[in-house]
Amino acid sequence: METDTLIRHLENQLLWLDQQNYTYLNLEKLFDETYFNQPLSAAEQSPTNKEEQLPEDTIESLYAQNADCERCPLSETRTNFVFGTGNVSTPLLFIGEGPGADEDRLGEPFVGKAGRLLTQMIQSIGIDRPDVYIANVVKCRPPKNRTPHAEEIAKCFPILHRQIELINPALIVTLGNVPTRALIPDASGITKSRGQIYHYQNWKVLPTFHPAYLLRNPAAMTSSWDDFKKIMTLCFDAES
């Protein structure tokens, strides 16, 4: 991995730790001289052909740098690394929790029943799904669709943060508790935080229910629709 890329990963990881209010690092463990003094392998000394062909600081290069990620145990059971999909120039970014079985199989986020509902909801406010970007907090499926562990979120978060930076949306819509608290650690539960406007650094954040929750609790659709009606103003009204 090139030095500049490594530095960006370290900066993003430290940024996430700061967001989680960590105030202490064990520097004796952080700086392992035996590790840093090891000679670079030939692969590490020379970038791959894929890296040579890709310009830096793009979604494509970010994907190439992380597609073979093995930072946490989720990589051991995944079928596909589910990075994200959509329009990288969009003003609207949706962030979910993590891939499910369909997403793991196909390598794209929100392609199962919950994904079809999300597509309908996006279309209901006059936007086509290909015109937004959709990603998840973790990029590999947790076993049996369980909630991602804090350590797994921490390992994946630098990738998500860089996606946000590169897309630079006018609005981030977080779908459910996991993405909401990944960006806004002190946010209340989703039933209280939904529909409110938060900020993650320079970006506006609108939490709402996850489509999978809506499939199990249809009565919550009315509240979710109220949230979605705010999207057009928040994305496209310069004075909002």
Image (spheres, grey):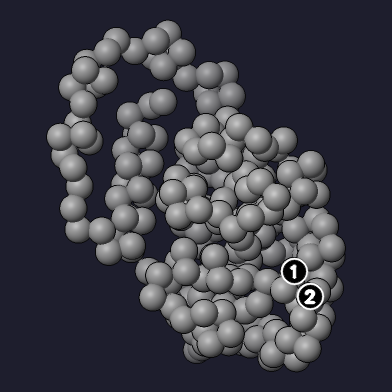
Q: Amino acid at mark 1?
A: Ala
Place of residue 82 in the rendered image (x, y in percent of width and height, measured from the top left) = 66, 45
Residue 162 visible in the displayed image: no
Residue 179 vs residue 78: left or right?
Answer: left
Residue occupying image coordinates x 33% and y 63%: 19
Residue occupying image coordinates x 39% and y 35%: 5
Q: Nearer the viewer, residue 208 or 77?
A: 77
Q: Nearer the viewer, residue 117 or 133?
A: 117
Reply above or below: 17 against 56. below
Q: CA distance from mark 1 to mark 2?
A: 7 Å
Q: Which residue is mark 1?
A: 212
Q: Amino acid at mark 2?
A: Arg
- Label 2: few (<14), some (14–19) or many (≥20) C-alpha neighbours in 10 Å: few
Q: Which residue is mark 2?
A: 216
Place of residue 99 in the rendered image (x, y in percent of width and height, measured from the top left) = 68, 51
Q: Residue furthest left?
A: 28
- Label 1 residue SS: helix
- Label 2 residue SS: helix
- Label 1: few (<14), some (14–19) or many (≥20) C-alpha neighbours in 10 Å: some
